[in-house]
Amino acid sequence: MSQGLRLIPPPIRLTDVPEPRFDHLLRLSDDTGLFEHARHAIPRREHGYCVDDVARGLLVVAREPHPAPDVLRAAERYLAFLTHAQDADGAFRNRMGYDRRWQDEASLGDWWGRALWGLGTAAARCGTGRLRREAMYAFRLGAGRRSSWPRAMAFAGLGAAEVLRADPHDRIAAELLGDAATVIGLPGSDPEWVWPERELTYANPALAEVVIAAGDLLGDEALLGDGLRMLSWLCDTQEHQGHLSTVPVGGWRPGIPKHRHDQQPIEAAATADACATAAAVTGDERWDAPLFQSIAWFLGDNDTGSVMWDSETGGCYDGLTVDGPNLNQGAESTLALVATLQHARTLATRRATRPSGGLA
């Protein structure tokens, strides 16, 4: 496929969106954790496991209102993996080989933040009390630390927001969420470049989402408005010819023409997360449109018209290149698909009870 050629798929409707499936996630899981990589749909054991993906795995299972028994058992293994990765001071190792040996030392990188995001979500939402209690113990141990990396703080802040929604009086979670919003900073006054950073790199929607959550849960209307402004500008920036075109590997910078590849499924999922939070906080249906664009990205409404998931396996392809999908189905991409389809299910339920045009 030549660069710039986009196959136009038929219009995608919300009724076309499949239910989230966990079969490929379970295929990537064993009694230790969750394999990071796959070749096509077959796990690559030689690459081992990482906290980044195991934390995402715990998060999506905790979001399930009625997980099947095998999915819930996987959540228990993911939680055990995360608590094993955590040191006595609350930091986390990230990488473990297939030989079950850790390959790094505990620190406060993105994996620390993602671990707290998964743990906070499990502590707040998991349907099993013993898992909630263990997740909360590990969350509190990690929540006393602070990272110098804005995205690590953003991920940790999202975990803190989950805890605060369950218990608005949780002081430790409130302090972490407030500190995360402070590290991210405020949007600028230039309408051409609202973003608080001088470039868009990765996980950008998470930064806006945590500012929105902090404004909402900490009662700061101005901060809430700042976060919504950031997200609105980002959604506008990522829209291309009526569909989502996520910030790709290599990022975007002001004054430099945008390149479009390689796009990662995790970026579409992060956009869905942030728009779902904005919709829940504001009750404003205008967030449904960019949320649906994130969902539709996986179904083929993207820059190359490529369906990004395998209906046979339930796995998601690892990236969108100029020539179409990277056909490997690793953990990060599959978790991104599952998380986004969870939002699609919620959106469908909401619109069934309060219908309006365009997405049904």
Image (cartoon, grey):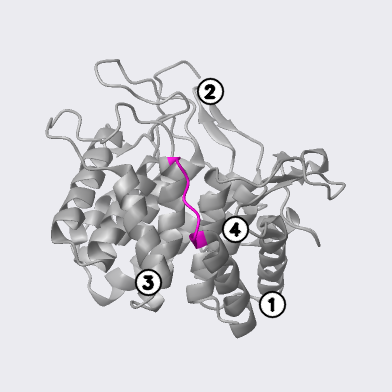
Looking at the rendered image, the disc whose residue lies closer to the viewer, 4 or 2, is 4
* Residue at 14% in and 61% down: 221
Give the residue type that dot 4 points to. Gly
Boundaries of the magenta span: 143-149
List the residue tagged with mark 4.
90
- Mark 1 vs mark 2, foreground winner is 1
Residue 144 shown in magenta: yes
The residue that label 2 is drawn on is: 323
Which secondary structure, mark 2? Answer: loop
Q: Mark 3: which amino acid?
A: Arg
Per the image, the residue denoted by label 3 is 171
| Dot in front, 4 or 1 | 4
Marks 4/1 in contact by CB < 8 Å: the verdict is no
Asked where in the image residue 170 lies, by quadrant, the reply is bottom left
The residue indicated by pointer 1 is: 69
Secondary structure beneath disc 1? helix
- The residues bearing labels 4 and 2 have C-alpha atoms spaced at a distance of 43 Å
Task: Label 4, secondary structure: give it.
Answer: loop
Quadrant in which the C terminus is drawn: bottom left
Q: Is residue 346 shown above or below 225?
A: below
Pointers 3 and 2 in contact (C-beta within 8 Å)? no
> Are discs 1 and 2 less than 8 Å apart at CB?
no
Q: CA distance from mark 4 to mark 3?
A: 17 Å
Q: Report, in whole angstroms, how far the alpha carbon at label 1 lies from the one at label 3.
A: 34 Å
| Mark 3 / mark 2, whichever is N-terminal | 3
The three-letter amino acid code for the residue at tag 2 is Asp
